[in-house]
Amino acid sequence: MFVRGLKRKCFDGEEDIEGTLAGIKAIPSYNLQRQSLLDMSLVKLQLCHMLVEPNLCRSVLIANTVRQIQEEMTQDGTWQMINTQSTGQASLDRLVSTDILCRSSRDQAEGKHVPAYGTFNKDFESDQAQDSSETMSTASSVQPPRNLQSNMWEMENPQENKGNFQKSLDQIFETLENKSPNSVEDLFSEVDNSYYDLDTMLTGMMSNTKMGHCDSLETFSSPTNTASNSNCKSDLNDLDHIVEILVES
Amino acid sequence: ADIISTVEFNYTGDLLATGDKGGRVVIFQREQETKSRPLSRGEYNVYSTFQSHEPEFDYLKSLEIEEKINKIRWLPQQNAAHFLLSTNDKTIKLWKISERDKRAEGYNLKDEDGRLREPCRVTELRVPTLKPMDLMVEASPRRTFANAHTYHINSISVNSDYATYLSADDLRINLWHLEVTNRSFNIVDIKPANMEELTEVITAAEFHPHHCNVFVYSSSKGTIRLCDMRSSALCDQHSKFFEEPEDPSSRSFFSEIISSISDVKFSHSGRYMMTRDYLSVKVWDLNMESRPVETYQVHEYLRSKLCSLYENDCIFDKFECCWNGSDSTIMTGSYNNFFRTFERNAHRDTTLEASRESSKPRAILKPRKICTTGKRKKDEITVDSLDFNKKILHTAWHPMENIIAVAATNNLYLFQEKVN
């Protein structure tokens, strides 16, 4: 019996690529790999096991990995907010929702221990300069970050968290509704586009290599002409997964 | 049978204790050599079984406290009874294991079946006599050391003074006296004032085998700090700091995770210590902080699989390591029920497997080989066919002889050097 994901090649498998032609097609973009690692890490932080306090060492190591990726992305300039009104709002909301999702999954655990992404929050704060007032109000339960981060490693005020959770949920659904598209899929694709505008690498060619990561990466393996559609589909799977977690609560 | 979570020989090697995920402790005793059963020497049989810890519920945090035994450490034997410390995430207990092979008979006030006799029926006085009975091994809890750890206890270590011991959790280390349960001293505290600044945790701690004032603790960033309790009451300042400089050519997003030390053990001599990180075992000379004196690769072929191992969480597995009695050989576990031994002077390493198929009683274990290149030779095992659910995290070596105990999930294997 093999553990899931073992046989699939992640970006570990570069040395197995043979032939120049195949090599050119198959080299996964570094930013893509990094993004997938970030997504994987965030999912790991979200999926805390509920009944028993999760392993602090594991949480710290994952959080450090997230921080490291984030720092690199900041230096690269790929961690930027697009400041146009429509996309800006969407991208901020995307970050808001990820942040809230991380917190809400903790609250899902009835106020259990949750590992964090403290600096994730911090960067989010600093980038809010543009849409400060509006986003501040919608992100009211994201502020104060102190409250969130002090709850990061220790459980305090589970009641407060439940209150925040309800607010967060409301916010997510509010922001989703405000988009006013007809179908859920359109909604997600709109959000996706703005998200991928952040990561400029993804407007380029899609790699053909199989990656060892959940569905989102495997969709990258099929080359398509409409790059944005495949972006949407993959992130749709991602978001589906996250919304599933929310809905299950 | 439950998953074994710790294995430990006592100081003479006659007793072997295992703790499991269900909070039970099982102690095995070595059979004495007898003329009638000459081959039985070296066999370990069950000596005592008891429930050490029960699951608890922390009402304040709304969390369960697992009963899984994280560590067992024996105390040196001082009388006929045996003592050991066992700990789960929050509470340490001192257990006394004693034998009873005599029973008193001829009580004045009690019948043979224990019922009280009518005082008026007692017409004469007699002295009770001791009669032999079937050996009974009793385990009784003598001390409970509780409520001193906010985080999960990962290590306990008995001091060479045989009067104190330390317990370490993710952020703090406490010093206890074996006789005192209502008080412990905090000797290391790495909890930051602002928890969002937390980037490093304590992963293991141990007292020096000879110097009762010295202990070490390892961290999730691959560092080891040696502390001297004579220098100050709170040992936040280390006396020595051991860290190997990072190799910039092999840096990746996983570098920190695989550098996290899962176990630290002093050599019996007290001159060296050994640390286990995800891919290697390192031997350090206590006199040299800049880098280890020896490095052994346990399963270097996994370096190219780190992403997958991160995905399935295997990268967080905490492997232990141990020295043999003379410090000439070190041992640690790997995946697929493989475990590795490294002979330091002979520069020889062996991979062995602990499984039913490959271990018939009295048969010699065949060394295994992992195929790292494309061409697989006969009897070699490819990396892709390794079973990552079969991990050997806990091993122990007899303090004097070449007998090893290997825990493979819920099975315990005992191997012995073949003596002709």
Image: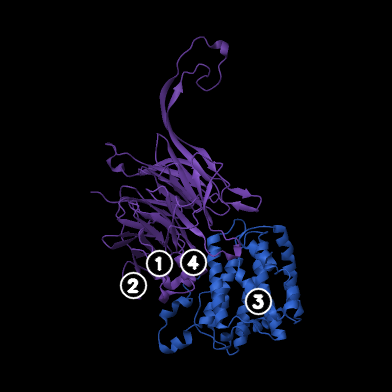
Chain colours: A blue, B purple
Q: CA distance from mark 1 to mark 2?
A: 35 Å
The amino acid pointed to by label 1 is Glu
Horizontal and vertical percent for residue A166? 74, 65
Q: Are marks 4 and 1 on the same chain?
A: no
Secondary structure found at label 1: loop
Q: Residue at x 42, y 49 (%)?
A: B213
Q: CA distance from mark 4 to mark 2?
A: 22 Å
Q: Quickly name the residue at label 2.
A: B376
Few, some or many C-alpha atoms within 10 Å of disc 1 (few <14, some 14-19, many ≥20)? some
Q: Quickly name the residue at label 3.
A: A126
State whether residue B133 is above or below residue B19: above
Q: Quickly name the residue at label 4.
A: A3
Q: Are marks 1 and 2 on the same chain?
A: yes
The amino acid pointed to by label 2 is Arg
Within the image, what quadrant is residue A183 found in? bottom right
The amino acid pointed to by label 3 is Ser
Few, some or many C-alpha atoms within 10 Å of disc 2 (few <14, some 14-19, many ≥20)? few
Horizontal and vertical percent for residue B45? 39, 42
Few, some or many C-alpha atoms within 10 Å of disc 4 (few <14, some 14-19, many ≥20)? some
Earlier along the polypeptide chain: callout 1 or callout 2? 1
Horizontal and vertical percent for residue A14? 44, 80
Earlier along the polypeptide chain: callout 3 or callout 4? 4
- Residue B158 relative to residue B67: left or right: left
Q: Residue furthest top?
A: B123
User: Which chain is disc 3 placed on?
Assistant: A
User: Which chain is disc 1 placed on?
Assistant: B
Toward the viewer: A238 or B149? Answer: B149
The amino acid pointed to by label 4 is Val
Q: CA distance from mark 4 to mark 1?
A: 32 Å
Q: Quickly name the residue at label 1.
A: B244
State whether residue A14 is above or below residue B283: below
